[in-house]
Image (spheres, coloured by chain):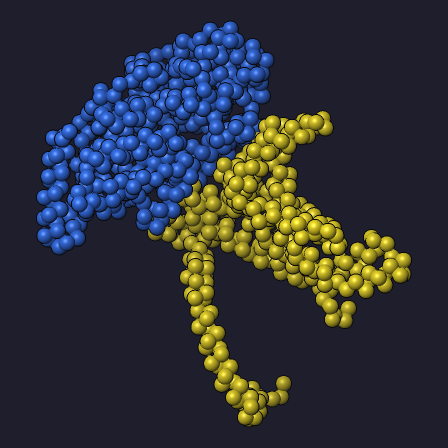
Amino acid sequence: MTQSPTLSRRSTTSAPAPLRKSKRSGADARAGYTFLLPWLLGFIALTVGPMISSLYLSFTNYNLFEAPKWIGFDNYTTLFQDERFLQSVGVTVNYVIFGTPLKLAAALAVAMLLNSKRRGQGFYRSAFYAPSLIGASVSIAIVWKAMFGDNGPVDQGLSIFGINLGGWVGNPAMTMPMFILLTVWQFGAPMVIFLAGLKQIPNELYEAASMDGAGPVRKFFNITWPMLSPVIFFNLLMETIHAFQIFASAYIISNGEGGPAGSTLFYTLYLYLRGFSDFRMGYASAMAWLLVIVVGIITLIFFRTSKSWVHYSGDSR
Amino acid sequence: MINRRHFLTTVAVGTASAAALAACGTGSSSAGKTGSAENPVTINYTWWGNDDRAERTRKAIALFESKNPDVKVNGNFTDFAGYWQKRATEAAGGGLPDVMQWDLSYLRDYGQRNQLLDLGTVNINTDAFEKSLLPSGQIKGKTYGIPTSTNAFAVYYDPAKLASLGIAEPTGKWTYDEYNAFLTEVGTKSNGALFGGTDYTGVWWMFNIWLRQNNIEAFTEDGKLGFTKDDLKKWWNQTAALRGTPAIISEERVTQLAPKSPFGSNVTATEVTWDNFMAGYLADSGAKELKLVPVPSDDPDNLGLFLKPSMLMVASAKTQYKDAAARFIDFMVNDPEVGQIFKTSRGVPASKTQRDGTTFEGTDKLVVDYEKSIEQYLKDAPEPPIVGFGTLEASFKRIASDLNYGKLDINAATDAWFKEAEDLIKQNA
């Protein structure tokens, strides 16, 4: 760079037309910030402020009643000796690793089915989307608990086929499959995004492939997958972050205890219990920040690896 | 009907409020802000419980308001678990309700941390209370809670279920081995259709009673554990042979049934717990009759039993309406008509005035009679347990349940609980 910044600025402002433009853009900017202000104030007061204070609290011993006591990194170091914490990490990682890909696979499969022109597609799309609207609600968690309980519809349904698992809710080995089913069932949101992505793929590509004698599997891996990869990437990222944050359904199905035998002790549930049942808000804050950091790192890894498999149209590759 | 004391209080309050109004308009005297019949003050009252208790409380509040036209009571309730999480958030924000129903387990957490009003500084009549009971609401000479009622530990059983299996009703004079044999008999004779009971070693208070039977204190004066790992191992070993047999219900079933209890769901023949659960069990199970007998003990002269305040009434340290709050607490614990409304659903009324003014019939009489029958065995009520006791109690239950799932063996379970307990005691020291 040989040109100094002042020089370059003078060179652009020397022409009269851009000058007027920059004046106007100054006023525009003011108007813009004014319109932004309500959100900005809310963002600072309700998001940034609490985040900073929770960062501070994570270095303290704070029981909600008395002033926080500074203890440095103690909360962070004791975390790794806390068996319940390690258990909650295990449960959550399990859920993310199995739940997210299955949910995305279901979403993509259904999106591809709904992509063809058929009568009543609008109805099917709404019907498949509905669970994701209500899936995270309290009532669904209660229904789910009843469905998978002793002699519930699932237990009885499986008995017809000679599978006698009993209730899933009380069986530590079966609670995780139950939660994964619950999340897979809510594939509606990623499905809608997949559907939009599928519509963007030019039909000529498929026609050309057919001409060349490519079957459906070949078409999927050579056309659909690469063309859809930015959308897949987006969904994978969002759903992974989302999965780490599972709370409401776990809280309700396990009566807020993370049982049976700790099998539903999700990270956020343990965080909540530490903060609001055990009054260890400093500890809970440390957990929250650790989650933020870990999710941040995972996102970074996703972005780094994305270069090798995500293709944006217009890319030379 | 004009009650003389209430009439006098009203007059006194009226005078005080007039004086306060004359002084500055916003009275903040030692009695706090006061109201009048035309311009009543509103206090918030919160409690835990089911719909049945909500209905009874609504009646009690209406009665209080008719007797105290200068106070309005705004009631609010949740279930027990959610109750404490809500209080914690409110306390952090400085917004605890004026008057609250309270549990002994949490008295230190809030009392020692200056969240609760010292009720010794306001006017509440405790003349009609057993002197041995009041200390359970006191910490270091300050009174933070007034017991509404007492409860005691007992073994519940359903006579009809035992009769149908041809098993004789227990007398309540039994050792742990005899009780275990009884549980096994139920499970065997019913062919697993009816379990003997739940694993009673998972209940903290039963463990506490067993410690008392062996003359061991659960907690020392300075807030440390008074028992050893070996004691706890011995305790969890009591039912080692019963786990996984029809004598006790599996933890899987217990989890499935939650939040309803196994006994209330008619899948067990007995349950070891507080005697004031009677009304709830009757409603849940639909049983015609349930009976109570004392807990087992290996020492027939020492049953380790005591009367515990089943719940206390407390006020927020930050309440602006100290006088109204005190009058409401006084009313809830002493008034005979309140006794008539609640019967034994809060436990047996602690105040003699209230107890004598209440007619107990049917199952309510069973509970009262049970507490009378164990009178000779009763020892002093325990002091308010250590700070963080609610957490310890919950982890005791959780770890015992891991034990039943076979996730931990007795040694590992004991180590796990002690680690959590010691960590917590250190944390709150």
Residue A126 appears left or right of A214: left
Question: Viewer-proximal residue, A144 or B150?
Answer: A144
Q: Looking at the rendering, which quadrant does residue B51 occupy?
A: top left
Q: Name the residue rendered at 45%, 14% in the picture.
A: B158
Q: Name the residue rendered at 68%, 27% in the picture.
A: A159
Residue B87 is situated, as x and y percent measured from the top left of the image, at 36, 42
Q: Looking at the rendering, which quadrant does residue B339 occupy?
A: top left
Residue B406 appears left or right of B107: right
Q: Name the residue rendered at 34%, 46% in the picture.
A: B91
Residue B414 appears left or right of B38: right
**Chain B, colour shown:** blue
Which chain's colour is yellow?
A
Q: Name the residue rendered at 67%, 62% in the picture.
A: A304
Residue B244 is situated, as x and y percent measured from the top left of the image, at 58, 21
Q: In the rendered image of this protein, does residue B43 appear above or below residue A55?
A: above
Tell me if I can see residue B239 in this picture: no
